[in-house]
Amino acid sequence: ARNWTMPPLRPERERRERTNHASVDNTCKGFDRRENQREAGFTMAEILLSLTIIGVVAAITLPSLTGNINERTWNTQRKALYARMSQAIALMPALNGYGTFTISQDETGSKSITEDTAAEAFVTEGLSKVLKINNICDNDHLPDCGIVTSYTNMEGSLNAFPTTLSELNSALTSPASLSGLDWGTSQNEIDTKIAAFETQNGESIAVVYNPNCHSDPMVTTTDSDGNTILHDTPFGPLMCANFIYDLNGNKGPNTVGKDIGFMSVLYPTDSVVVAPVPLVRDASSSVTPYNAGNTCNTQDSESRAPNIDEAASMFYNKNLLSNNPNTALYWSSSVISPKYGWAYNLDIGYKLPREHTQGRALRCVKR
């Protein structure tokens, strides 16, 4: 018998089988790598540490980011509201004379208002004809229009929300001490009650109304150099209407300069609406009008010196700014002549002509 042996593999088959063996080896090595990768993953402690770091960073950055978004939203809403109110006031006839009063006097001569429909009538019979309004509330139902019971003023003090003109600013309804001045008494306006309304855009607005508002009784004189000086009553024009607005109703933060602000209407005919947004602090305790613009830009690039009507609005709403307003005279941007400009006292509210070279305090505002 012949001794048979296995014939040698053909070269092609040998190469194929060697390749298959290599594939099996590589597959095993692949499993080994994946197993090693599992063993090299993050531990639970490392994951928790990473999440903690992310949380801390988010807690630091999110409030600032949210605050910036809210600030831009409030600025946009504020400007839109001012535009609507300005257009509405321009469409109204003379602003004085709305509402009725009943004033009684007791045996001691003390007078009191027993009936007051002024602010409510101003909104119902006047403003609602030219502005879209959802709801009108009398003095006894201010919260029904989203008016809060308390707010935070610009210096951070929590105050009760005013319900009458005297609570807004007592200097408007009582004589002020003006020793050394020739004009005598303060604005001495009627202590009217505050009404409120809601707009279709969701703003809640409290209304202070003065039915006896008037324009300046101006007197022109000249100084020793022949420069023109304009004099008027120390308090200038009487406020016709004052609006305290809350851009988001009774939602927070209910803080002046954020969601709460004010605008004032002066002059019964050809009325002017101003809505200054004062900065939190004075820009300077002594500055001349020549340096006022640069001083405001240094404090805030978007701010400027207030004109005389804006300064008057700041006086009307002084409690919204501070519980202890500065008694200094503040410069306005309103010019009388090349030598004189108007300065305004934000405490008791009189305005005086002063030479441009004199140093006065400055409180900058934004539009």
Image (spheres, rainbow, N blue to C red):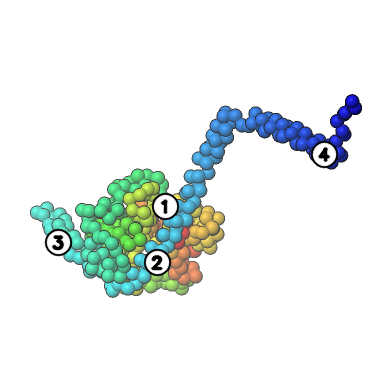
Tell me which label, 3 or 1, sits earlier in the chain: 3
Tell me which label, 1 or 4, sits earlier in the chain: 4
Tell me which label, 2 or 3, sits earlier in the chain: 2
- Mark 3–mark 4 contact, CB under 8 Å? no
Q: Amino acid at mark 2?
A: Ala
Instruction: Please say whether residue 27 is visible from this viewpoint.
Output: yes
Tell me which label, 3 or 4, sits earlier in the chain: 4
Q: Nearer the viewer, residue 68 or 28?
A: 28
Residue drawn where x is 29% and y is 64% of the image: 133
Quick check: 91 above or below 333? below
Q: Secondary structure at mark 4?
A: helix
Crowding around mark 2 (Cα neighbors within 10 Å: few <14, some 14 to 19, many 20+) is: few
Q: Position of residue 288 (x, y in %)?
A: 51, 60
Q: Determine which residue is flagged by label 3.
A: 102
Quote the CA–CA distance across marks 1 and 2.
18 Å
Q: Position of residue 336 (x, y in %)?
A: 44, 69
